[in-house]
Amino acid sequence: MKRIEHGLEVFIFGSRWLLAPFYIGLIAGIGLLLLKFVKAFIAALPIVFEGSGGEAMIAILTLVDITLVANLLLIIIFAGYENFISKIDTHEHEDRPDWMGHVGFSDLKLKLIGSIVAISGIELLKYFVNVGQHTERDLMWVVIIHLTLVFSGVMFALMDRISGGGHHASEPESHTEAKE
């Protein structure tokens, strides 16, 4: 019976590799965002030189928005892969981000909601730059959605703090347990 249990546990543990294609797909998604960024950049050039200040700002904010989404995907890819599949061995590469390998699931949730709120803020700013082109109802809904996301982020952080689930990003969980 112990052999069956061990075999089942090895099989279950190995099943984590079924997530790898999802992360490869997200990497391809960053490639698609790169194409979208290049297209938006090329479209922004004549606007910056010939359009109004508001139009130029919208074009630049679109580039910022695409960049934030790409950053969000990168955080999900790195943290998700390391938390659920395997550690990424970079042989102590000098460019390895300090947070890599130290972002737990709780930290990941907070980074995600923070990125989503930032993206929502950019969208809200786009609406305010062109306030005359939108109805009051549209503006009301954009503000309500943004405030809901901000509230959700604050609640996530508060719940994490209350539950004591927040470990410092620079302090791995095993190190914390060794201190106790």
Image (cartoon, helix red, strand yellow):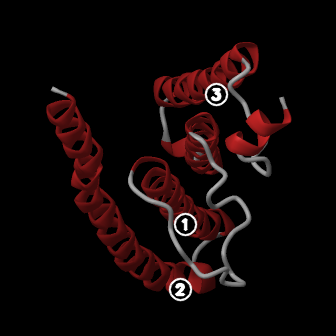
Of labels 1 and 2, the one closer to you: 1
Q: Quadrant of the C terminus?
A: top right
Front-most of residues 133 and 149: 149
Under mark 1, the amino acid is Thr
Residues 140 and 146: in front is 146
Q: Which residue is mark 2?
A: 45
Q: In the figure, is residue 30 to the left or right of 156?
A: left
The residue at 69%/15% (across/down) is 163
Give the vertical position of 93 relative to 37 (above or below). below
Q: Where 174 sits versus 36, above or below?
A: above
Q: CA distance from mark 1 to mark 3?
A: 21 Å
Of 82 and 176, nearer the camera is 176
> Residue 176: which numbered mark, if any?
none
Q: In the rendered structure, find residue 153 and report the number of the disc placed on it.
A: 3
Amino acid identity at mark 3: Gly
Question: Crowdedness of circle 2 by 10 Å Cα count: few (<14), some, many (20+)?
Answer: some
Along the polypeptide, which appears first: circle 2 or circle 3? 2
